[in-house]
Every structure is written in C-alpha cells, then in structure tokens.
Amino acid sequence: KVNTIHFPHFKIDDHYFRSVKKAGLLFGRGGSSINSINQVDNIDYYSLESILITNNFPDPHQLDSIIKQGKHKWTIFSYHHFFPKNSNEHKLSESGKYNNSYTITPETFKKQIRLIRNSGYWIAPVSTIGKYIWEKENSEIRTSRYSNLIFLTIISKLDGNIYNQPLTIEFSTPAKKVKISGSSTDGVYDNRNGKIYFNALPNKEVTIEIIE
C-alpha cells in the first residue's frame, strides 16, 4: 500500500491536507533545499522537508557536514536520476548546458550511502521511518518479572495493520548473557557494555531471560 506522496513543486493549502488524509496517505514530502532537516520533536508529517541531491551537490565535505548536523533528526535525501558516466544522459548533464541537474552516477550514489551508513545512520524509506517515529511517540512500555524472566510489551493503540514497524528497545542489565524471545531479533546476546538492543513489535509480548 502507498503511504507517502511527493510534491516537490506544489503549493500546499488546506485542500491538499484534506485530500491527502482522505486518500489514506500518512506522509507527504514537500519542497527540497540544501539545508532542510526535520526536527524529530516538531514534525509536520504531511509537509516533510528534504535535501535535494544534484550533480554538483553535495560534495564529500558538504555531505559530512549534513550528516553531523542531522544527529537525532530526520534527514530525507531526494534523489532523482542515476545514469552511468558513459550514458548520453550523464554527458548531457555534464555539458554545462544546465546550471544544475538531478543526475548522479551509481558510483557517486554508492559512495554517499556508504558514508551515511558508516556514520551510524538508519537508512530506510520515508514511510518506514515515519511509522517508527509515530509509533514511538504513541506507545508505552509495560513490564513484569518472574524469577529470571522479564516480560515486556510495547503498548500501542494505533492500528497494527498500518503501524507495524518494530521499535528498538535498549535493555540495561549487569547480566553477562541474555536470551530474547518473541521479538523481531530473537537470540542469545552477550552483554559487553551493560546494554542490549533488540527490536519488538507493538502489542507483542517479549520474554527476556537472564541466563548468567
């Protein structure tokens, strides 16, 4: 199901918001610029800002700066066309006929994604991240304990058929080994720094077993 609409050259008004919501869409990506980053604590889900990627922006230094500015925020990169260097389309974009084009090579794209990934960012589609943030804002964690078992549930009143993204749980414990069951990332975890991370779906009970 389509959850996101993109409208880079469209004037937003009340009619737009009514139409988008009536259609059942959850997110809208609006205009692009070179410095638009969404603040997580103040998001307009129907008018998300994005950073426009062109044939000459960003260079590696600029991308590194964007990554550093985007910590704890939601950065959306707007890509358009990918053409190999030997293609006619790429040659035209580099001919100087246009001040900017929305064309980059697959090699440049791979380098950019590698730098973003290696900086510790989560890379995912707009709808996936949007659902995650909305779920997080509208959920609470409930736990109970019996012996060496901890039962954890993320309580959410949102529609589980729509908002179905696993949320990341940070579990702090002095235990050396912990078993996670019922999550999206089950397994036995060796605790090396006092914290264990796992992903859990809303309204699904997770069992945390302290092994040692």
Image (tube, rainbow, N blue to C red):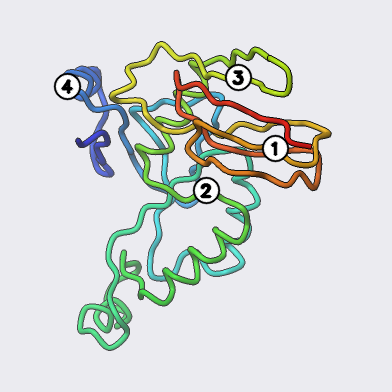
Q: In what element is the residue under mark 2? A: loop
Q: Are marks 1 and 4 in contact (CB under 8 Å)?
A: no
Q: Measured from the top left, where is residue 119 in percent x and y?
A: 63, 57
Disc ID at residue 178: 1
Q: Label 3 to label 2, Cα distance in Å? A: 27 Å
**Dot placed on the residue nearer the N-terminal end, 2 or 4:** 4
Residue position marked by numbered label 2 in the rendering? 122
Q: For the residues labelled 3 and 2, say whether their Cβ atoms are less than 8 Å apart.
A: no
- Mark 3 or mark 1: name the one nearer the start of the chain: 3
Label 4 secondary element: helix
Which residue does the numbered mark 4 point to in the structure image? Answer: 19
**Earlier residue among tags 2 and 1:** 2
* Whether label 2 touches label 4, CB < 8 Å: no
Residue type at mark 2 is: Trp
Which image quadrant is residue 93 in?
bottom left
Q: Is residue 34 above or below residue 209?
A: below
Mark 1: amino acid: Val
Q: Is residue 37 above or below residue 103?
A: above
Task: Give me the disc on residue 151.
Answer: 3
How many other residues sit within 10 Å of disc 2, few (<14), some (14-19) or many (≥20)?
few
Residue that extends furthest to the right in the rendered view of this protein = 174
Tag 3: residue type?
Phe
Between disc 3 and disc 2, the foreground one is: 3
What label sits on residue 35 in the rendered view? none
The secondary element bearing badge 3 is classed as strand
How far is disc 2 from disc 4 in space, using C-alphas? 31 Å
187 sits to left or right of 103? right
Drawn side of residue 87 relative to residue 104, left or right:
left
- Earlier-in-chain disc, 4 versus 3: 4
Mark 1 surroundings within 10 Å by alpha-carbon count, few (fewer than 14), some (14 through 19), many (20 or more): some
Mark 2 → mark 1, Cα distance in angstroms: 25 Å
